[in-house]
Image: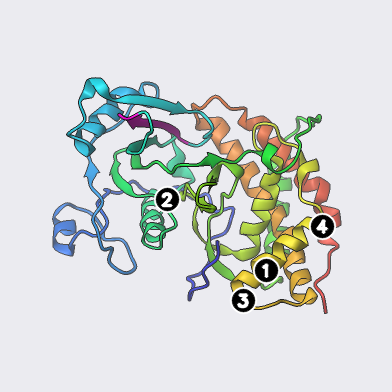
Amino acid sequence: MAVPPPAPPPRSPAHLGRRAPRARCSWGMEEKAAASAGCRAPPGPPRSGAVPCFGISVDQDDILPGALRLIRELRPHWKPEQVRTKRFTDGITNKLVACYVEEDMQDCVLVRVYGERTELLVDRENEVRNFQLLRAHGCAPKLYCTFQNGLCYEYMRGMALGPEHIREPRLFSLSADVPKVEVLEQELAWLKEHLSQLDSPVVFCHNDLLCKNIIYDSTKGHVRFIDYEYAGYNYQAFDIGNHFNEFAGVSEVDYCLYPAQETQRQWLRYYLQAQKGRAVTPREVERLYVQVNKFALASHFFWALWALIQDQFSTIDFDFLRYAVIRFNQYFKVKPQVSALEMPK
């Protein structure tokens, strides 16, 4: 989850700036080819392999025809009449369909279509760079291609975890009020001032480590992460605090499932020992515990704002407004207790 490099200035978790549309290109192109195609080469070291970019746009409301056009490019030896498809419905940012021929799905291509106007929230060029970087280190599936409004990648065998695998879910009631803009501006200023004093290191983060983005292969004992569209440099404590928040689930959210202090400290001890390669002191664990729980507030704030924007533009059948209210409510509920936590001396 965290690889500490010499990091560029971190992007704020609440960064929601609109980006001007840019031509897309296959990473790893030679500069001359990129220039002739009107594409800007991505920053950083050159990639070892180019990713094909097809000029195909897939209709969000009728994915299959566009998906099959992509399959003809990626798997020309497959007979069209033998291609099977499977829709996945867990995602709330994008739409996803699997294409395969054999029943065992050993060779399976996932076609992911970006959600409407998600470029307001996601840097898609950065997502492709993250995908290739993580693949080079054995942490991601193969990226087969990009297309005008999505990408195709390898299917990872395993089970996408759900909240029921972490805790027994329970239902509860919630308020229906969204805070006023003036209140949100005040809270954002408070978060910036308060969290900047915690000295949490900037590392490479997943930034969206909900249960369904964790794949467990029981045959090999492997845990892998998927979906890197929000990945990037961020505060270490944000990534962990965000993961702890996701213990509550997405569709049926219950913050009674937020990990208890004992569970958190055990998790953080394992994390620090893996990171440092040695036994760690109780003070080190306590320091990270305080940082994580304070940055968990920023996680609530960010995803609440994200849900408000999705509520305006997304065509996915999900109650984004309700989800925003849930996150705002939890933010204001735990803020007094969390803000009172003190760093160990």
> At 51% across and 47% down in the image, what residue appears?
219
**Which numbered tag is attached to residue 196?**
1
Residue 341: name its quadrant: bottom right
Expressed as whole percent of the image width and height from the top left, the position of residue 190 reads 73, 59
- The tag earlier along the polypeptide, 4 or 2, is 2
| Closer to the camera in the image, 278 or 184 | 278
The answer to whether residue 117 is above or below residue 35 is: above
Residue 123, numbered label: 2
CA–CA distance in space, label 3 to label 4: 22 Å
Q: Which residue is mark 3?
A: 276
Q: CA distance from mark 4 to mark 2?
A: 35 Å
* Residue at screen point 26% across, 58% down: 40
Q: Nearer the viewer, mark 4 or mark 2?
A: 4
Q: Earlier in the sequence, mark 3 or mark 4?
A: 4
Dividing the image into 4 quarters, which one contains the N terminus?
A: bottom right
Q: CA distance from mark 1 to mark 3?
A: 23 Å
Residue 275 location in percent, x, y?
Answer: 60, 72
CA gap, disc 4 to disc 1? 23 Å
- At mark 3, the secondary structure is helix
